[in-house]
Structures are given as C-alpha cells and as structure tokens.
Amino acid sequence: MNYTNPLTSIADFLSLGGPVVALLLALSIVALAVVLFKVYQFLRYRVGQADRARKSVLLWRQGYFDEAYQNAAGGKSASAISVARAIELLLARKSQSAKTGFDGLTKEEIEEAVTLTATQELHGLRSGFRLLDTIAQIAPLLGLFGTVLGMIDAFQKLQGAGNSVDPSILAGGIWVALLTTAVGLAVAMPTSVALTWLETRLDNERLAIEGFAHGILAPAGAQVASSNPLTAHQAAQVVTALSKAHAH
C-alpha cells in the first residue's frame, strides 16, 4: 500500500496549476473562514429563531406589558431587540401621557425608531457578505485568466516544436490550462450557495421584525392606556398570524 504525503500532493497540485491556483486556494480558505464565522454569529444571535419575540408580542397583545418588555429585552436576536425597543417607546409614551396628558411620540415616529434599531442590528449581521460576494464573482474570472495563460503557453510550446509536433504536448497543455477554470468554479459555487443561504436567513429575520412590529404598533396594541387584554381566541389568532408572517 503506497502512502502519499498530503503536503506533497498539495505542493504538486500547486506546481501544476501555478500561481493562479494558489491564489484560488487562498480565496477558498478565506471564504470558508468567513462562512464558518457567519454561521457561528447567526447561531449566537439566534437569527431565524424568533420564539422570544413572538412570545413578547403575544404577551403585549394580552395586556401583560411589563412581562412582554422583560421577555423581549432578555433576547439577543434582532427581532427580540426590535420588539423590546417598540415596547419601550410605547411604555414611555403611556407614562408621559399619564403625567402630562400628551402622547409624545407619534406612531410614525415610533415606527421610524424601531426601523432604525432593526436596520442597525441587521447591518451588523451583514458584515462579510460583500467579501463572500467578491470571492464568488472573482474566482471564475481568475480561473478563466489562468486558462488563457495556460493556453498561450501550450501554443508557444507547440510552435517551438516546429515540424516534430507531438499532439500530447498540446493536449497536456490544454488540460493543465483548464484546471484553473475548474478550480475557480469549485471555489465560486459553494461560496455563492453559502452567501445565498445567509442572505435568505437575514431577509426572513427582517420580514419577521416587520410582522412583529406591526403586532406591537397595531391600534389594539398601541393604545396601551385604554386597551383590554385579548381573549384566548383572539390571542390564538394573533399567534397564528405572526407565525404565518414569520414563515413567509
């Protein structure tokens, strides 16, 4: 049984593909590192896991205002933070109205504040996306560039052979040249798939935040001073509507 040293195989592969393949392998390592970090970040900040935010909206709609705020404020997800911000502003509005008789912030101003909070949270989660997009776009171009250089070298060798042309010279040069294109595509395709998955998760989080904010700022929830707790049937309807909004 023959044992091949992996480092030797990699060195031979790099020698065969040239500097373009070496650059593509370096880009693949960078892309993998970024993807792994983003997956860890998404898990840490519970992207796509909106149970806490959904529960806070339900508590709010049932009239348990302080419990709703405490539940949302204890979350790390962008949806929970945004819901906590909306509840905080509405409770401050209620307190000011009770003291001065004026409502203070309008519903539109509260919506703008919540939108700003959500945008800031989601912007932080988008870090690294541009780098992944750049790698996904430039990797095939680098592969094609390496192929063109390889073809030029192969035809130069063919020309230098003169009358004693060996077809294997041209065939060998072509397959080596095409190697860079294959490597470029191998780097670009999984990077593009990973980026699409990450962007989809973030878009779903944004849509969930919009649905939860609507649940908090809807007239039945915004009129805190005069609203009554929902019945069990109404609460169930709210949960169903919010679940559908998050799913889409």
Image (tube, helix red, strand yellow):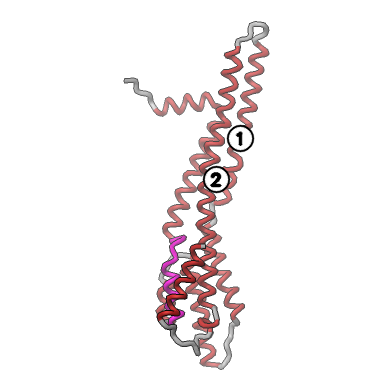
Which of 88 and 240 lies nearest the eye of the viewer? 240
Residue drawn where x is 63% and y is 20% of the image:
153
Mark nearer the viewer, 2 or 1: 2
Mark number, residue 192: 2
Residue ranking furthest to the top: 164
* Residue at mark 1: 142
Q: Which quadrant, please, contains the N terminus?
A: top left
Q: Given the image, on which type of amino acid does mark 1 rest?
A: Leu
Measure how far apart labels 2 and 1 are at the Cα level.
Answer: 16 Å
Relative image position of residue 36 (x, y in whole percent): 45, 48
Residue at image position (58%, 75%) is 111
Q: Position of residue 10 (x, y in %)?
A: 45, 28
Label 1 packing within 10 angstroms: few (<14), some (14-19), many (20+): many
Q: Which residues are magenta?
A: 46-63
In the picture provided, is 151 more to the left or to the right than 232? right
Q: Nearer the viewer, residue 207 or 91?
A: 207
